[in-house]
Image (tube, rainbow, N blue to C red):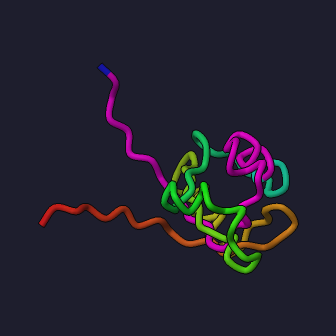
């Protein structure tokens, strides 16, 4: 049985939905890690519905942006990233925020 591990997450807003990033999140992870001197745990996850991701080619250029969430090693790594406020992805600066995991339980 695997030990439950809580991942420390950060969200980046305004990430361009490039074909290579949508089809392979390994490529997106490599892009971010190499240009931002940071290391992730696992691959980033797009925060958009599958239908929108599949219809990206029909969207107007200004609509081809979404958010991603990714996990970092520890609180210190998250603090350092959030202190920068922005991260470079595909030659653009995208804004960072602390990811708030919200439970649907009432």
- In front: 44, or 8? 44
Rendered position, 73 above or below 88: above
Q: Residue 99 in the image: x percent, y percent?
A: 47, 65
Extreme residue in the left direction: 106
Q: Quadrant of the N terminus?
A: top left
Give the residues in magenta: 2-31
Q: Residue 14 in the image: x percent, y percent?
A: 67, 73
Rendered position, 94 above or below 49: below
Extreme residue in the top direction: 1
**Residue under the point 40% across and 67% down:** 100
Image-quadrant location for residue 3: top left
**Residue under the point 71% across and 46% down:** 29
Tell whether 53 sits left or right of 19.
left
Tell whether 72 sits left or right of 26.
left
Q: Residue 77 in the image: x percent, y percent?
A: 61, 55
**Residue under the point 87% across and 66% down:** 91
Rendered position, 45 above or below 1: below
Extreme residue in the bottom direction: 62
- In front: 87, or 13? 13
- In front: 74, or 71? 71
Image-quadrant location for residue 46: bottom right
Tell whether 78 sits left or right of 102.
right
**Residue under the point 62% across and 61% down:** 55
- In front: 2, or 50? 50
Q: Is residue 24 magenta?
A: yes
Q: Residue 22 in the image: x percent, y percent?
A: 68, 50
Extreme residue in the front direction: 58
- The number of numbered discs placed on residues in the rendered structure image is 0
Q: Is residue 20 magenta?
A: yes
Q: Quadrant of the C terminus?
A: bottom left
């Amino acid at each position: 049985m695997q030990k439950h591990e809580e991942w420390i997450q950060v969200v980046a807003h305004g990430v361009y939905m490039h074909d290579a990033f949508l089809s392979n999140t390994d490529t997106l992870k490599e892009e971010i890690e190499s240009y931002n001197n940071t290391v992730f745990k696992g691959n980033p996850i797009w925060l958009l519905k599958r239908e929108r991701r599949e219809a990206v080619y029909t969207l107007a250029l200004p609509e081809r942006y979404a958010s991603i969430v990714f996990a970092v090693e520890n609180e210190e790594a998250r603090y350092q990233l959030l202190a920068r406020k922005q991260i470079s992805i595909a030659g653009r600066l995208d804004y960072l925020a602390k990811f708030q995991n919200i439970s649907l339980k009432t």
